[in-house]
Image (spheres, rainbow, N blue to C red):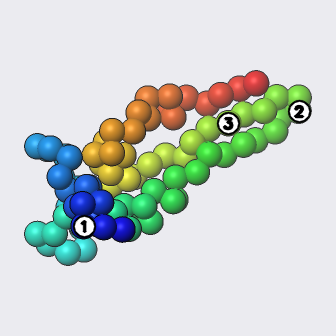
Amino acid sequence: MNGAQARWISSRGPGQKVMDPDLPFQSMTPRRALALLKEVRIQCLAAGTQQIKLVNRRNALQAKVLRALSVDTSTWSKAEIA
């Protein structure tokens, strides 16, 4: 990862900086952000003949990282039933 990529999380523009909760006055590194996001999972459940897919809830810090990366999560809160 080069220096430009390493600074990307903190330089997306005004209001987009994600601070590291464990290190005061330091923006979150991409490695830390990805480690947080790997906990976001899609759950697939089988109920008889129906399949239900949903994304588990994000904590506040994960939601902030996703907003900073401009990820559209508007459909993640709705279960998909097929």
Q: Tell me which amino acid carries mark 3.
A: Lys
Q: Label 1 vs label 3: CA separation?
A: 38 Å
Residue 38 vertical placement versus 47 (above, below):
below
Circle number at residue 43: none
Q: Is residue 27 visible?
A: yes
Q: Tell me which amino acid carries mark 2.
A: Gly
Residue named by callout 1: 3
Q: Label 2 vs label 3: CA separation?
A: 14 Å
Left or right position of 34 against 16: right
Q: Nearer the viewer, mark 1 or mark 2?
A: 1
Residue named by callout 3: 53
Residue named by callout 2: 48
Q: Label 1 vs label 2: CA separation?
A: 51 Å
Q: Quadrant of the C terminus?
A: top right
Sequence-first tag of 1 and 2: 1
Furthest toward the bottom, the residue is 23
Sequence-first tag of 2 and 3: 2
Q: Position of residue 69 (x, y in %)?
A: 33, 45
Furthest toward the top, the residue is 82
